[in-house]
Amino acid sequence: MSIRFTAKARRGTVALALAAGLALGVAGCGGSGDDGKKPDTSASASKSAGSDPSSQEGQSETPLAELQGADGLLLQITSATRDSGGFVTVNGTLKNDGDKVVTVPAQVSGDETEIIAHGISLGGATLVDSKGKKRYYVLRDTEGRPLTTTGLGNLEAGQTLPVFMQFPAPPTGTTDVTIQLPTFASGTIKISG
């Protein structure tokens, strides 16, 4: 299966899931709003009881790793999932933890000509399997575009940006790998799936 087909299929699946979620949200919000009923007191009582919000209510899980970069940049890795297509998708958040505007350094794109030609991206990221003594680079499509977040530029103070990177999957027995990104500290993450 080609990488392009996999990427198209993934985008289609995400679009379908998004459309289904929006449809459910609209259906849940339907109604005239004046049906003569009093508000459900059990729902408001549980909210005021001080229960912890779930991760679906906007609270993110503890990151797998936090990679500190220059000028207050912070890359938080939130998941690393092995997919059936033979690749690993790493998701995270790039945050400006500083108090002034920061430009994402061009070095994060790496030094491969094909990747640099497509703008600033996280194309310089690698996964290192110390046990198997292998390094895995960000995948590229047939036109040389990295399968990662692209078009990075300036981040305002406190701004966060969701990011992703796709790599070839290490052997199934390998779960702990080190993620490296130029200008950032490295960190160890656990692959799930």
Image (spheres, helix red, strand yellow):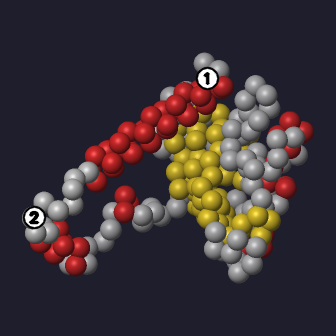
What element does badge 1 sit on? helix
Please state if 29 lies on the left or on the right of 36 as rendered: right
What element does badge 2 sit on? loop
Please state if 113 lies on the left or on the right of 53 as rendered: right
Mark before the other along the chain sequence, 1 or 2 = 1
Residue that mark 2 sits on: 36
Residue name at image x 65 percent, y 21 percent: 2
Residue that mark 1 sits on: 5
Picture quadrant where residue 77 is located: bottom right
Residue name at image x 58 percent, y 38 percent: 88
Q: Is residue 165 above or below residue 162?
A: above
**Furthest residue toward bottom:** 99
- Is residue 84 visible to us here? yes
Q: Is residue 147 above or below residue 183?
A: above
Q: Is 182 in front, or is 156?
A: 156
Amino acid type of the residue that numbered disc 2 sits on in the rendered structure: Gly
Amino acid type of the residue that numbered disc 1 sits on in the rendered structure: Phe
Q: Could you tell me residue 158's position as x and y percent?
A: 63, 74
Q: Could you tell me residue 176's position as x and y percent?
A: 57, 48
Residue neighbourhood size for the residue with mark 1, other residues' Cα within 10 Å, grouped as few (<14), some (14–19), many (≥20): few
Residue name at image x 38 percent, y 39 percent: 20
